[in-house]
Image (cartoon, rainbow, N blue to C red):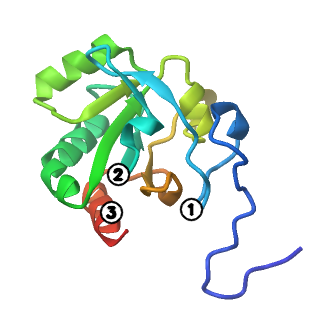
């Protein structure tokens, strides 16, 4: 067994050979990996794919459910910093398994102007490692692990935040986007 004894992050051997969704199911993505492609509807019926953000940085955040306290706070925080992310050359896309109609109600209720995409099939959630087994009160179930990816203009993952705690998270992602 090899141990990393330095302060350097471990070298990543999980390079994706292509950008298809099926190429990474069940694996955790890491900085340096090619971001899996996707094709999802938004709240208005338009479609988003990774190519939709070509030439821009992308903040891709996965959240469990529209209109719950943590998810609402996270969306409001990212929405409030939209202008700063735009100045940093970064777009923001939130993804949950909720249907598009739920996203539309959520955006209207909280006056959100950021893009939200629906992954009801959970294919993208699985490809990005955000659909995981969870446990509450001894009961195991599948659900969304609150996760954020910063994807560079080149389509490679630049940073990953797993098991996100909402307070100050959007600000930390903004700082990383500015530094990229």
Report the disc number at residue 31.
1
Q: Are marks 2 and 3 in contact (CB under 8 Å)?
A: no
Density class for disc 1 (Cα within 10 Å; few <14, some 14-19, many ≥20) is many
| Lateral position of residue 46 relative to residue 151, left or right | left
Taking 82 as reference, is 180 above or below it?
below
Q: Earlier in the sequence, mark 2 or mark 3?
A: 2
Label count reads 3
Q: What residue does disc 2 label?
A: 56
Which residue lies at the image location 33% right of the left edge and 59% below the top edge? 173
Q: Is residue 73 above or below residue 141?
A: below
Graded by Cα atoms within 10 Å as few (under 14), some (14 to 19) or many (20 or more), the crowding at tag 2 reads: some
**Gap in Å between the C-alphas at discs 2 and 3?**
11 Å
Residue at image coords 29%, 11%: 101
Q: Earlier in the sequence, mark 1 or mark 3?
A: 1
Q: Position of residue 139 (x, y in %)?
A: 62, 28
The residue tagged 3 is 177
Residue sticking out furthest to the right: 1
Q: Which quadrant of the view contains residue 118?
A: top left
Residue at left offset 10%, top offset 29%: 111
Tell whether 10 sits left or right of 47. Answer: right
* Secondary structure of residue under mark 2: loop
Upstream in sequence: badge 1 or badge 2? 1
């Amino acid at each position: 067994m090899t141990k990393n004894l330095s302060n350097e992050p471990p070298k990543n051997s999980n390079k994706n050979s292509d950008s298809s969704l099926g190429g990474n199911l069940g694996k955790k993505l890491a900085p340096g990996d090619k971001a899996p492609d996707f094709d999802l509807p938004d709240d208005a019926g338009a479609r988003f794919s990774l190519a939709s953000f070509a030439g821009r940085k992308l903040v891709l955040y996965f959240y469990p459910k529209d209109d719950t306290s943590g998810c609402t706070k996270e969306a409001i925080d990212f929405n409030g910093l939209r202008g700063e992310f735009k100045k940093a050359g970064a777009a923001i896309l939130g993804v949950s398994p909720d249907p598009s109609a739920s996203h539309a109600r959520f955006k209207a209720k909280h006056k959100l102007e950021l893009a939200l995409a629906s992954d009801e099939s959970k294919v993208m959630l699985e490809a990005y490692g955000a659909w995981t087994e969870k446990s509450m009160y001894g009961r195991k179930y599948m659900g969304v692990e609150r996760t954020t990816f910063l994807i560079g203009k080149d389509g490679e993952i630049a940073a990953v935040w797993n098991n996100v705690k909402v307070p100050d998270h959007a600000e930390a992602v903004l700082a990383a986007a500015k530094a990229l």
